[in-house]
Amino acid sequence: MAGSSFPAWSRSVEQCATEFGVDVNRGLSEKIIEKKREQYGWNELKKVDGKPIWKLVLEQFDDLLVKILLVAAFVSFFLTYIDGEQSGENGLTAYVEPLVIFLILIINAAVGVWQESNAERALEALKEMQPEHAKVLRDGELIPDLLARELVPGDIVELRVGDKVPADMRVASLQTTTFRVEQSSLTGESQAVIKTPHAVQLEDVELQGKDCMVFSGTTVVNGCCVCIVVSTGMNTEIGKIQAQIHEASLEEDDTPLKKKLDEFGERLTLVIGVICVLVWIINYKYFLSWEWKGLLPTNIKFSFEKCTYYFEIAVALAVAAIPEGLPAVITTCLALGTSKMAQKNAIVRKLPSVETLGCTTVICSDKTGTLTTNQMSVMQLVGIGPVPGSIRDFYVEGTTYSPYDGGILGWSGILDRNLQTIAEIAAVCNDAGIAYKGTQFRATGLPTEAALKILVEKMGVPNVLAQAKIDQQRDSGEHLSDHSMVKLGCCEWWNLNQNRVATLEFDRSRKSMGVIVRNAIGKNRILVKGAVENLLERSSFLQLKDGTVVPIDDFSRDSLLAKLNMMSSKSLRCLAFAFKEELDEFDTYNGENHPAHQILLDPVNYANLESDLIFAGIVALQDPPRQEVKKAIEDCREAGIHVMVITGDNKNTAEAICREIGLFYEGEDLTGKSFTGRDFLALSPEKRIKVLSGKSGQVFSRAEPKHKQEIVRILKDAGEVVAMTGDGVNDAPALKLADIGIAMGIAGTEVAKEAADMVLADDNFSTIVAAVAEGRSIYNNMKAFIRYMISSNIGEVASIFLTAALGMPEGLIPVQLLWVNLVTDGPPATALGFNPPDHDIMRNPPRKSDDKLINKWVFFRYMIIGLYVGVATVGIFALWYTHGTFLGIDLSADGHTLVSYSQLTSWGECSTWEGFKPAPFTAGLRTFSFDENPCDYFTAGKVKATTLSLSVLVAIEMFNSLNALSEDGSLLTMPPWVNPWLLLAMSISFGLHFLILYIPFLANIFGIVPLSLNEWLLVLVVSLPVILIDEVLKFIGRRMSDAERRSRKLKSH
């Protein structure tokens, strides 16, 4: 298909016109346009249909933990309904348990749907980059505002300064001497690119090498041209990027934490199933009995009531085993993490990214705008000395377009005649400006020329009174107003003294730009700036420090070329300044009516006009590295994070910047470490993997979107957790594919921001390192509260299992367990997210992606803790029934009847006991009596014992949260007050427990009663040992860790 596969860049204009059936001077006819529309469609990006809302909702329930909860909720609802039908009680309070579970599932599903429905806005941002109108030639008539979506391949389009390119087009002819396009957002190049109508020799060439092509979404910054549309819609480069973004979004993996929680869910399902079966096996005799007659069972008896009772216990087990509050606590902790990161200028768009950051092993960074400022700056000024051959160096501070950003080192403030000439040429032979928007200074026009104007502002003017006035304006802020051009006082002063009467536009053959200026007394001169070698070749004279003009000799020429070579080796872009005073027929030139004007109409004559020049000096410019990047690279190296640079810029510039930021040391051999995108893809798959597995720094230059994606994909397949940074449209597919996509907030395009997981508000690479440290801290804290919640759930399971295994009445009912898991455990678990980070958090290597959330030792620890929770909750239940006192604490004040342990464990046979008449007892304001049915003492009468069990469970879990402050650190070295939020959370949880105990309405819902002071004392006595038990286990853990470290050291030696 011609619109997408024809290599227009390597074909002549005539061949392109023939291919697309168009006359460049007339454009397409209406009849041909209709045919092409049918063939190629509209010039717009395809709208990708998102998932329907019903499918998104269903996907939220495709999780094992959620499925278990769903089953538990339905079973609970069914059993509650049956119980209500049999007892005649079917009020809303009876359905609290299933309703709460359903509410949790609905909230989780709503959050998931909301997150996913916002996932593809990057594609919409791409569409905003496309212009709405274009200037098109059709049937010999120029249509000034045709809708861009109506363009078809073969259309003839005129482009001017400021236009946004509406399609991928082949340049047919230039209407100005030069034509430049800003395409850094697409290709990553740091400078505007000169376009030409001449074909490229090679068909297989990267985007940056297609000098005769302009691409959809890029911007014209200089000149005017006529183009032939060659690709529209999804066939354009920006269309291909949309397809890549969509493809990358389909490859999104679960975060490391999600994978671990899914794995945990699978194990939990197995454990719950086994325990539920065990409970039924242990207690089958209560609902199923038979007699053997020979080999056949007879007289089979089945109790549906008892069967459903133990089914309810199984449901209670499921509720106890699942940490229902975990999703809410994780979401809360991640939200708190995003708040902390926002304070450090890292704006997280997707919550799970906070945790993923903590295990980042590779950072793939774009160069332009990420490691560098994406603002051209003059780094060095070279003036001529007092004698031929002598050179003066001045180093310029500052890396932005702000006139206040730094000064000139070693500057006396006095402008000699040579420096005045340099300042004059930089200010007058210049079409750029500086705009102020928000808090940022931005270039308008060519970045190189904008940097020269900032240099002039730092140099000043020779007129003392004028300089004083300029300084006064700056101090008052008069030159600044939002969304306006900045008043550059020094540049204006030079321009007021020189009236510009003609411009000799830049062209690629002579590599220079000149202006003819007239001063106040009517004297004309030519001021020129351009490539150093070209201007030196066309210079016959040299201006010395005091302004004296002398013939340029070989020594002076060689000195300047040596300086040029030295600066170029540092990847500095060098420009020379020269002027000419004897202009012959142009001495009196004053505009278009002058006889010599005809000479200016042909650019071929410009080189002759710019001959016999007087050479004045050189400036060296660079898109400089951010000052803080070098330290950030060192921090990454220490933290075990591998840094790669992937850029669209040329190889030499990329390597020079990488040396400057410390990714490579000076003189390091870059064989096997520096590749162009094409060279890398030319390697065999095995060789690519080998290259990327190296742990030293690496740089990939001239990289296109497909190269970036391939690098990220190989790294992910190798098990690396990849963070990709970028700011351009060309970065978007890789940002989407990476585990963490990080976009620049200031210089970044909207496409990059929407594709990213995180946006840097300050465009600062070091912010990424700070965010990684924060991510590691958050992950450690999340591990703490996940382990805390899981250990608490193990305790609840142990409690229910022991109750069922011993045959005692049910101590904890599902609605109480739900309350503990969701409400009581929630505040301490959330507060554990505020644990202070370890001091050496960025000195340790990244955790492995298969690092276990709960290793064997930690699991054993929490099995011990869980067993104690089970023993303590079941034990205090049994104590109330069997003992009047315990450790001197009187429990008989309420007047309840004591029973033996054997009676308690065979309470189901209570109806056969002779003379069993329990006495009434009081609990709070209520009195419980059992005259009608003495066996109710073990059902309705267990309310006090159940309350004691629930209170012990709450108290133990509060004390256990103190154990979770550190995995192995003792409370003696990490006391509770290191995290005051935890102490506050414990107070809130106890407060909530008191609320349901002492407010009658809530107490009835949860089936509990108020406790006396003595009973609270018993609760504390039974609960506090959990701290001592875990302290002993932590001590053993520390000894094991020390032994493991010693073993590793011995192996390393």
Image (cartoon, rainbow, N blue to C red):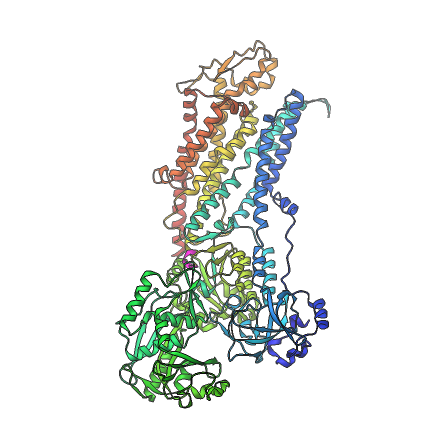
Percent coordinates x, y for residue 678 in the rendering: 54, 71
Percent coordinates x, y for residue 107 in the rendering: 57, 40
Percent coordinates x, y for residue 928 in the rendering: 53, 14
Q: Is residue 943 visible?
A: yes
Q: Is residue 857 magenta?
A: no
Q: Is residue 369 left or right of residue 707?
A: left
**Front in this rendered view, residue 743 or 543:** 543
Q: Which residues are magenta?
A: 763-767
| Prevalent SS, magenta region | helix
Residue 906 to residue 1030: above or below: above
Q: Is residue 266 visible?
A: no
* Quadrant placement of the N terminus: bottom right
**Front in this rendered view, residue 403 or 779:** 403
In the rendered image, the residue lying farthest to the front is: 593
Residue 525 to residue 746: above or below: below
Give me the residue at 29% from left, 70% from top.
467
Q: Is residue 818 left or right of residue 1016?
A: right
**Front in this rendered view, residue 573 or 152:** 152
